[in-house]
Amino acid sequence: MDGILPLWKERGMTSHDCVFKLRKILKTKKVGHTGTLDPEVDGVLPICIGKATKVVEFLTDTDKAYEGEITIGVATTTEDSQGETIAKTAVAQDLSLAEIDAAMEAMVGESIQVPPMYSAVKVNGKRLYEYARKGLTVERPQRSIHVMSFERISEPVYHAEEQTMSWSFRVTCGKGTYVRTLAVDLGASLGYPAYMSSLTRTMSGSFAKDDCLTLQQVAEAMANNEIDAHLKPIDSVFETYHQIALDDELWDKVKNGAVLPKDGPFETMKAPVLFTYQGKIVAMYEPHPTKSGFIKPRKMFLS
């Protein structure tokens, strides 16, 4: 059993819970997820099975899309609805749609983000959430993120009793973006504490909600011997990559992981490319980081 299973992760489960259950349902240990979703976030979670576990890193690197809700006027320890309240500021009812939309539009593009303390980012060998659970705060590594779109998709709702305001949003972003932190930073730009009050991942790479099965549906497909019909081919991960077919001479070099001169068909190569031999993907090569004028293997797909 080899391929990619687009799973719809339900709320209340960790991504690891999904992997654990799928190993039992699919009767195989070679199962890996492609990017952690918090327990209270539902949505698209591509699962790699069998030989497809070799391409986990490439699915993790893909763009993601989410729909969710932001609430301004309150901040929490975890930047989402699961944390304890740490700040409150009454929201003015005259906050305009133009102000909100302009603030969201300003966050589109490249920027620097500091990951939340309650996250899986490692600092000195420990996850940030391990420090946070002990009440500790440590210096966190900044990261460059790319937001392709960030827009409001509902009218804001003012909650008079709490003096907060909420609205729904849609965001498309690159690898490593914490949407919780986007919500907090958006609130700050409007002059208020904020948190992400709900989130659903609607797309991961080329996979969308309509492609997905729930755990219950996976179990039913297995019971009916229909699971293969739901597995996407491993090669589908690389649909957007440039591919070069190897002749026998180059194949003899590539299969041994040779560093190649950046000439001929590779002369203008700037991004990773896939090499195929006899119709099969056999390797991914990329520009050498230290040897100008050469390319090197990033990943081999020989077995």
Image (cartoon, rainbow, N blue to C red):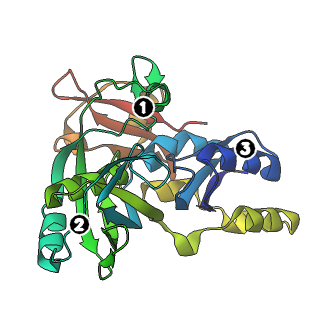
Q: Earlier in the sequence, mark 1 or mark 2?
A: 2
Outermost residue toward the bottom? 155
Q: Nearer the viewer, mark 1 or mark 3?
A: 3
The residue depicted at 15 percent of the width and 25 percent of the height is 292
Q: Nearer the viewer, mark 1 or mark 2?
A: 2
Q: Position of residue 247 (x, y in %)?
A: 40, 43
How dense is the environment of label 3, judged by Cα within 10 Å: few (below 14), some, or many (20 and up)? some
Residue 14, how many percent across, how many down?
A: 61, 47
Specify whether 225 is left or right of 207: right
In the image, residue 8 sits, relative to residue 17, either above or below, namely below
Whether residue 111 can be seen here: yes
Q: Which residue is mark 2?
A: 91
Going by the numbered disc 3, the residue's amino acid type is Phe
Q: Residue furthest right?
A: 223
Q: Which mark is residue 20?
A: 3
Q: Can you identify the residue that label 1 sits on? A: 254
Residue 127 screen position, x and y as percent: 46, 27
The three-letter amino acid code for the residue at tag 2 is: Val
Question: Is disc 1 placed on a helix, strand or loop?
Answer: helix
User: Residue at 55% of width from left, 61% of height from top?
Assistant: 42
Amino acid identity at mark 1: Val
Of residue 254 and residue 103, the one placed in the foreground of this image is: 103
- In this rendering, is residue 277 above or below 297? below
Residue at horizontal 73 percent and vertical 63 percent from the top? 228
